[in-house]
Amino acid sequence: MKGQIFSGAQPTGNLHLGNYLGAIKQWVALQEEYDCIFCIVDMHAITITQNADELRHNTREIAATYIAAGIDPKKNIIYNQSMVKQHAELAWILGCNTPMGWLSRMTQFKDKAGKNRDNAMLGLFSYPVLMAADILLFNTSHVPVGEDQKQHLELAREIATSFNHHYKTEAFVVPEPLIKQEAARVMSLRDGTEKMSKSAESDLSRINLSDDAETIAKKFKKAKADMEFDGIFYDKEKRPEISNLLTIYAALADISIRQAATQFAKSGNGDFKQSVADLAVEKLSPITNEVKHLMNDVAYLDSILKDGAEKAAEKAEKNLKTIKDIIGFVYF
Ligand code: AMP
Ligand code: TRP
């Protein structure tokens, strides 16, 4: 039997190069080997205040990006989370089996809630429980994500294990993370010690998948890079920004960081940045153009989401019933 993949991205703004190299590019390769479900996690998105029109737009744009990047909607299930109510149902059940202490340790919650924790929303706190529900709902064997999701995945594993133990069952498959080492953490172009993120203030810090060729070239040209060394080499401590650019180049070219470093060993910063920009434009432009094209056909995108949601709901309901039986819920 093929393994089951589940992964997702939040429709909270433009997807960027980090999302692409850390997650989506992997998904495209995995669809050959696994049964795959790729979700647009709109229920996760509302843990931070969203504008309704933007949320709707972003949900469709993410669906378009998955397809444009090469995920085949005929072979895989693509849908938005809120269309499948079993996510919320299982999240409640798991929430009744997750100690608050486990959630208090989540670094993402600490970062996002900031100092004033009492004012943080319950949904932001319980977010990892919903994420565990997403994964456990489908007997997922593998979860391909970037490194920032590692802690949430470990929690999902703990929740699955403790539920199985408590109810003396093996109902939940304990999922394995798939974190591709090379591009697991793409860093900001302005600060090589911060990860590239949708929410960073400076747009120059990230390459959005919607950026045109000129913008991509400009952003790489302006990317921070040290001046005190000759040639290009990888050293994350001494040269975080150049090392990040090498990582990006290697991931885009499907070569190792070592190979990329050899290729540019004698280059100057300017030439090297130009090569990274050229390759990024070459690889990303077809995706960007296809996203634009698909966004003109909302009816098509919606038909994919609807079809995906129906298929996902059928699988989810079957698994949820098993859990309801174990717990002792009466259902008809
Ligand atoms: P998000 O946009 O936060 O929903 O993330 C979607 C996917 O992209 C997740 O698997 C993240 O781990 C991954 N991701 C986000 N930012 C980065 C980054 N800077 N480098 C690598 N992967 C990332
Ligand atoms: N929390 C993930 C992120 O912010 C998105 C996500 C939600 C997810 N549910 C998931 C990823 C389940 C993998 C599996 O990137």
Image: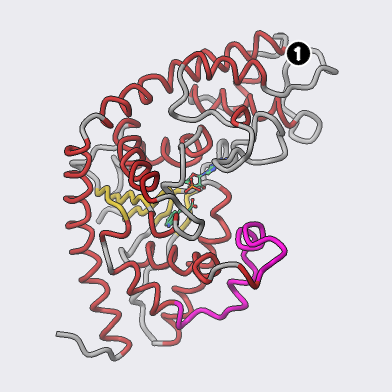
Is the N terminus in the top left, top right, bottom left or bottom right quadrant? Answer: bottom left
Image vertical order of residue 66 relative to residue 328, above or below: above
Question: Which residue shows up at 56% across the image and 81% down it?
Answer: 99
162 relative to 187 in the view: left or right: left
The residue drawn where x is 50% and y is 34% is 16
Specify few, some or many for label 1: CA neighbours under 10 Å numbering under 14, 14-19, or 20 or more. some
Magenta stretch holds residue 21: no
Where residue 292 sits: x, y (%)? Answer: 32, 26
Give the residue type that dot 1 points to: Gly
Is 262 situated left or right of 279 in this image?
Answer: right
Q: In front: 128, or 34? A: 128
Residue at 35%, 60% in the rendered image: 140
User: Which stretch appears magenta?
Assistant: 95-117
**Does residue 116 show up magenta in the picture?**
yes
Q: Is residue 92 above or below residue 22?
A: below
Apparent side of residue 324 relative to residue 53 in the rendered image (left or right): left
Q: Is residue 138 left or right of residue 279?
A: left
The response on whether ligand 1 sits within 8 Å of label 1 is no
Residue 155 x/y as whole percent: 53, 67
For this orientation, the residue located farthest to the left is 332
Measured as percent of width and height from the top left, residue 98 is found at 51, 79
Task: Work out whether residue 259 or residue 151 is closer to the camera in this orientation and state it.
Answer: 151
Rendering coords of residue 256 (x, y %): 57, 27
Display colour scheme: secondary structure
Q: Choose between 160 and 89: the one closer to the eye.
A: 89
The quadrant of the image that shows the C terminus is: bottom left
Dominant SS of magenta comes to helix
Residue for badge 1: 231
Task: Please determine whether, in this image, residue 221 is positioned above or below residue 95.
Answer: above
Residue extending furthest right?
A: 228
What SS does tag 1 mark? Answer: loop
